[in-house]
Image (cartoon, grey):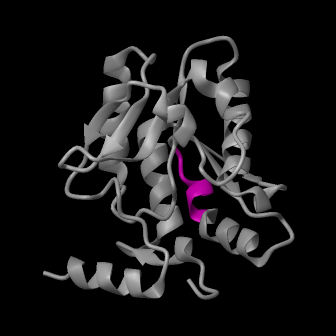
Amino acid sequence: MRGADKLLEPVSGQALLLRTVMGARAALGAVLVTLPPPDTPRCAARRDALRGAADETGGTLEMAAVKDAQEGMAASLRLAAAWAESRLGSGSGGLLVAMADMPEIDAGAFRALRSAWDASGGTQVIRAASASGRPGQPVIFPRRLLPRLSQVTGDSGGRAILRGEDAALVPLPGDAALIDLDTPEAWAAWRAAQRP
């Protein structure tokens, strides 16, 4: 984004990060937001953007800085897997992994994923998909996969784990499960497409 923080881009009148967190918390209850290292300007700016969410009722919001963020997505996944295991203990449950740079993932998407998770009994991977069935994000990993998530390396995230799983796909409207915006041009094109 050439210096700008894409997670602070406004979507529906809110910073994208705040909108994503509020939608997830409404559907899931407890949310962990992984942040850049604490000595970075982005960490402070993202904490500030989430200040309103921390004041809202209806679920838990925790924030944790990823100290080894230079490793990419894997560092955040390891932190999230450890957080989920500590919350779940020996019980069942899972971890929903959502990228905060996907502007079409909203509370309705999180509710659809939660509904599919509840219907599955919590043992199967639940994965958002485009309306045409192409797998995307977010993904719910069942508890049995948390030890593997806590070992991931590199920036490919949980893709290697997903390859060995028979995921239940949850179609979302259009390409919501696929759209992430990484450049000012992509944001401009997306905004232009949103206009009636």
Judge whether residue 129 is colored magenta: no
Q: Quadrant of residue 81?
A: top right
Name the one closer to the observer, 120 or 20: 120
On screen, 61 above or below 5? Answer: above
How many marks overall?
Answer: 0
On screen, 89 above or below 18? Answer: above
Q: Quadrant of the N terminus?
A: bottom right
Residue farthest along the top direction in this orientation: 90
Tell me if I can see residue 159 in this picture. yes
Name the one closer to the observer, 75 or 4: 75
Residue drawn at (44%, 78%), measured in percent from left and top? 10
| Magenta highlight: main SS | helix
Tell me if I can see residue 59 in this picture. no
Give coordinates of residue 83: x percent, y percent. Answer: 71, 35
* Relative side of 51 to 71, left or right: left
On screen, 151 above or below 130? Answer: above
Q: Quadrant of residue 19?
A: bottom left
Give coordinates of residue 184: x percent, y percent. Answer: 46, 86
Query: Which stretch is magenta?
Result: 52-57
